[in-house]
Amino acid sequence: MNFNTLLRHFREGTKDVFRNGWMSVASMLSIVVSLSLLGVALLLVLNLDRAADAVDKQVEISVYLNLETQQAERDLIEQEILDMPEVQDVTFISKAEGLDTMRETLGEAMVKGYEETGTNPLPDMFKVQVIEATTVPFVADKISALNDTHTSQPIYQVDYGKGTAERLFQWTQTIRVVGLLLVLALGVMAMFLIANTIKVTIIARRREIAIMKLVGATNRFIRWPFFIEGVLVGVTGAALTLGILLYSYFRIELVASDWSSALFTLMPLEDIWLWFSILILGLGFLIGAWGSTISIRKFLRV
Amino acid sequence: MAANQISGSDTVIDMQDVWKTYPNGTHALKGVSVQIDRSEFVYVVGPSGAGKSTFMKLIYREEMPTKGQISVNGFNLGKLKQRNIPLLRRNIGVIFQDYRLLPKLTAYENVAFAMEVIEAPRKIMKKRVMEVLDLVGLKNKANREPAHLSGGEQQRVAIARAIVNNPSVIVADEPTGNLDPETSWGIMQLLDEINFRGTTIVMATHNKEIVNTMRKRVLAIENGQVVRDQLRGEYGYEF
């Protein structure tokens, strides 16, 4: 194939998009709809997963120490907890700090009595964060067991919201599974939608291809403009989708930042736009290329 | 192509004992042997369903014979590889009753398509396409799409497309079948002129008046066999 012919294929492929007018619009729309469904599902699942992650992270283990526990033993315990492979971080909260927190959350009146008498009933404690939230109950048991290795029984109580945490994990797990199923279902739907569009195009193209072959066009000669046309329609559809989705996400992010808590924020747009764009445009390219290829393959044997 | 040459240089189409049976069991052709020479004009006549269309389709390799040998322009069609079919077709102009133009292309683009296929340089293409459009009398309608041309004009575009690459053979399957008598005569004059310039023409037709007026060689096919082969023959049927 010489260069002029290649140019010709690009020219014809581009012209074909316009020549086929409504058919191109219909194909493009079906790609926009399919990719939007998929894109929305993907963004939703990613954010749900992030939310579930954030919720999981909230679950930490509180390790209350006995009032008599001395500094040396305290440091030892801290090191032992830190050495556990599941543990990410350990924070020590002294009884004085505990009282400060109590004042902030429950109000001055609650702590006033204690401060006047100089008796602080709160124990020293550790806040333990684990790497994988689901290991919390296991790690809590492990920490409780530390008492057995110390003769002084330094740990008073280990608490992680037993029951509540387990229910929470179950719930976030469900969200993840449902989200994944959603993406799969919408992916299948998108494929059907596109396959159907292709089927309609095939019927429209059957005669044209037969004529081209009668004039002595080779398969490759026929295929090229179709391929370029398909890719153009696919990528344009993907670009439209991307515009709609990214702009919507941007607006939602603006609104969400007003009421979102420290607990959960949307995945920031600047973190996702690049790979999301590449993914959607890539899918558009593939759908267009694949669609045009299979829609004419059948008719090249004339 | 010398290896494919199985007949004398003046024979353009050579069929020897050609049989065609379709998968549904229909015997369309039963032992047809015909030779058509360079610059001949041949009418193929016969009742509907006698095998005329099969005969035409075999020439440009839309169908393969079940048995027998066919050679066209030196190509041995029995041994022609799938990927070389386009090469054969570039040397055969095909014209149909229903024109078969690409609906979304203009008259010019339809004709140019046949030249793009052979990767002709654009400059030469432009000149040649306008030349043949002029020849068929459609120079000033070059930018119209088929939908905006009359039946006769569409057939002229199809003829222009068929001759643009100077093929040695034109196969015309009832080219006047959809046209009124007056328009039909215009098309016939055009084909006669093309034939006069040296192109072989094989034309299937039901038009008695044309065959009996413009006297040429007549091949009559009935029931899958050639029953008559006359130079300057007559139509010979009452319908």
Image: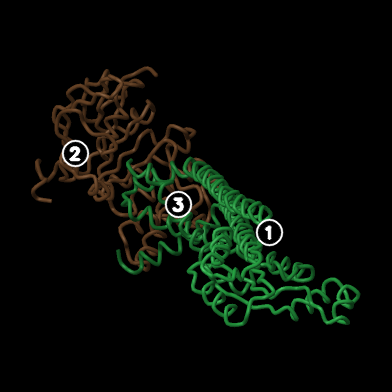
Question: Quick one: SS at disc 3?
Answer: loop
C-alpha gap between disc 2 and disc 3 = 30 Å
Question: Colour in which chain A is shown?
Answer: green
- Residue B94 lies in quadrant: top left
Q: Quadrant of residue B100?
A: top left
- Residue under the image location 49 percent in, 33 percent down: B180
Q: In front here: B15 or B217? A: B15
Q: For this rendering, which residue is in front, A98 or B131?
A: A98
Task: From the top left corner, tell me how far across and down residue A242 is, in percent.
Answer: 60, 64
**What colouring does the structure picture have?**
by chain
Q: Is residue B132 above or below residue A300?
A: below
Residue type indicated by callout 2? Ile
Which residue does the image show at 20% across and 45% down from the upper left?
B81
- Chain that bears disc 1: A
Q: Position of residue A128 (x, y in %)?
A: 61, 70
Q: Alpha-carbon neighbours of circle 1 within 10 Å: few (<14), some, or many (≥20)?
A: some
**Which chain letter matches label 2?**
B
* Quadrant location, the N terminus of chain A: bottom left
* Residue position for label 3: B137
Labels 2, 3: one chain: yes
Q: Is residue A273 left or right of residue B228?
A: right
- Tag 1: amino acid: Gly
Q: Helix, strand or loop at disc 2?
A: strand
Chain B painted colour: brown
Name the residue carrying label 1.
A161
Q: Pointer 3: residues within 10 angstroms few (<14), some, or many (20+)?
A: some
From mark 1 to mark 2, how far is it between C-alphas? Answer: 93 Å
Q: Is residue B102 left or right of residue A145?
A: left
> Label 3 sits on what residue type?
Gly
Residue marked by disc 2? B13
Q: Position of residue A297 (x, y in %)?
A: 37, 46
